[in-house]
Amino acid sequence: MPQTDRPAVPALDEPESPLVHAVTERDRGIQGMVRDAIAHRNVLLAFQPVVQAAEPYRPAFWEGLIRILDSSGRVIPARDFINDVETTELGRQIDCLALELGLATLADHPGLRLSINMSARSIGYPRWTETLDRGLRRDPTVAERLILEITESSAMVMPDTVQVFMADMQHRGLSFALDDFGAGYTAFRYLREFYFDILKIDGQFIRNIHDNPDNQVLTQALISIARHFEMFTVAEYVETAEDAEFLSAIGIDCMQGYYFGAPTTRPFWTVKSDDLQVG
């Protein structure tokens, strides 16, 4: 997951600048909020559909996005805290909880296919691997319905570890998605070794693509790369009909974004028929 730039830490004999102090206090506040949410299990998943380009009203799968609740009960999306905890123990605990919630959702809904985000750093975290193994043993159908999403930046931190883990899990039936592809310094040579099943093209190339010749060329190139390596393609952050139409025309397999549905903590499979309104 992309890291934000931070001011350099001052030497011990230098006074701490107001900016460094403000950033440090902000980070402590965010980490404290995440720590409290984990301690009280104030975590949940929000679900967003990933639709087929050929049949845009038919989800191919759903992405389960981790959320936490702050002390006032507000739902806090991952983008507001993940950069501050991703490399810490809190990041591993968040990955564990996301996986637990995802596995429970799959167990409760046998017809569902779901993707869950993870950091490559969690591969060596005992609780996370035990959670995954327990979930796969409990329900044999889960493996073929679970997709693990790893960001490009995370995968490149420890490519050898990711490669071995993926090969083992794919043998058990899991699928893997390379998330935010193109967001960083893409190492194309690794695509030959990773064998990701799904390539999710970063939203910076997708927004307003129908009117941006540069992004049109770049996205078409990424789709071509994915096809060469036999990977399924997903365009992220599709927000307009014009972008959706253009992406369908150039051969994208699936699309995800607010145009097709915002992340929701109350997906259709949790809504009782009595709650549905007619008309």
Image (cartoon, rainbow, N blue to C red):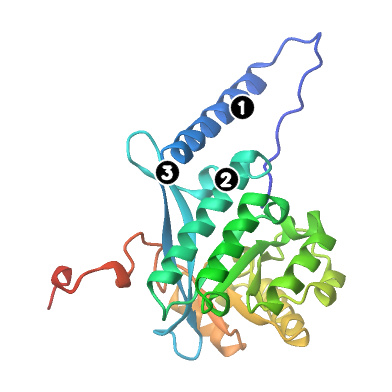
Labels in figure, total: 3
Residue labelled with disc 1: 23
Position of residue 75 relative to residue 206, above or below, is: above
Amino acid type shown at disc 2: Gln
In the rendered image, residue 38, in percent from the top left (x then y), is placed at 48, 40
> Dot 3 surroundings within 10 Å: few (below 14), some, or many (20 or more)?
few
Give the mark toward the camera: 1 or 2.
2
Of 171 and 275, nearer the camera is: 171
Position of residue 203 relative to residue 144, above or below, is: above
Position of residue 4 relative to residue 130, above or below, is: above
Q: Residue at x 52, y 28 (%)?
A: 29
Q: Earlier in the sequence, mark 3 or mark 2?
A: 3
Amino acid type shown at disc 1: Val
In the rendered image, residue 242, in percent from the top left (x then y), is placed at 48, 79
Amino acid type shown at disc 3: Arg
How far is mark 3 from mark 2, CA to CA?
Answer: 11 Å
Q: Residue at x 41, y 74 (%)?
A: 260
Q: Residue at x 69, y 72 (%)?
A: 169
Element class at badge 1:
helix
Q: Earlier in the sequence, mark 1 or mark 3?
A: 1
Residue labelled with disc 3: 41
How far is mark 1 from mark 3, CA to CA?
Answer: 27 Å
Residue 93 numbered tag: 2
Of 108 and 188, nearer the camera is: 108
